[in-house]
Image: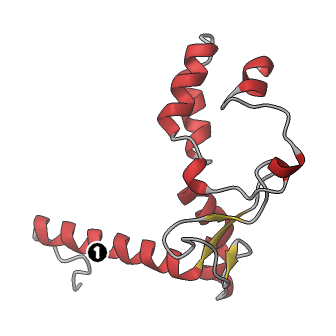
Amino acid sequence: MCNFLSKIGDRRTPTLTDERQFRHSSDDWSLDAIITATVRDCPATNRTELEEWLILSRYGAIAYKEMRSAYIHEGRSGKGTHSFELSESAIRPTYLSGIYTTPPTIGFKVEFMLSILECCIDAFEADALTLQQDPVPEE
């Protein structure tokens, strides 16, 4: 397993130029690609356990962990938010670290989180209409 992890994603010894590059979320592997590669190269891997562990590593889970308590309980943005402009930061999470920095630091622009919340509310309202149920029934 250690040998596999050291080579996943065509890993190699980075050059000085490589070390100065920033991570990009578009370069991240999909959940299915990680699971498929891991199970293929390490057949003894418990697929269910791996998938459960990786689900906690998705952007949404990271954002929830980093930001929920701060927004809900403290009325402020979380430590993983940022107000500055990065490439596509309003539409996707952005890394605030280099490609070889560990652990990687991921950030979420407030506008990105608001758009996610708006999508959730819109989907909830659409479901309520489809089911013909009042989402906030009077008692």
Q: Which residue is mark 1?
A: 122
| Quarter containing the C terminus | bottom left
Would residue 115 be found to the left or right of residue 88 on screen? left
Indicate the colouring scheme. secondary structure
Residue at 69% across, 85% down: 74
| Quarter containing the N terminus | top right
As displayed, is residue 1 above or below residue 109? above
Would residue 120 be found to the left or right of residue 126 on screen? right
**Residue found at the far top of this picture:** 43
Residue at 12% across, 65% down: 131
Query: Between residues 110 and 11, which one lies in front from this camera angle?
Result: 11
Residue 42 % position (x, y): 64, 14
- Residue 46 placement: quadrant: top right
Residue at 54% across, 28% down: 35
As displayed, is residue 31 above or below residue 41? below
Query: In what element is the residue under mark 1?
Result: helix
Residue at 75% across, 31% down: 11
Residue 32 % position (x, y): 47, 34
Residue 63 % position (x, y): 60, 64
Determine crowd level at label 1: few under 14, some 14-19, many 20+ residues with C-alpha closer than 10 A.
Answer: few
Residue 6 % position (x, y): 78, 26
Type of amino acid at the residue the image marks with label 1: Asp
- Residue 14 placement: quadrant: top right
* Residue 24 in sight here: yes
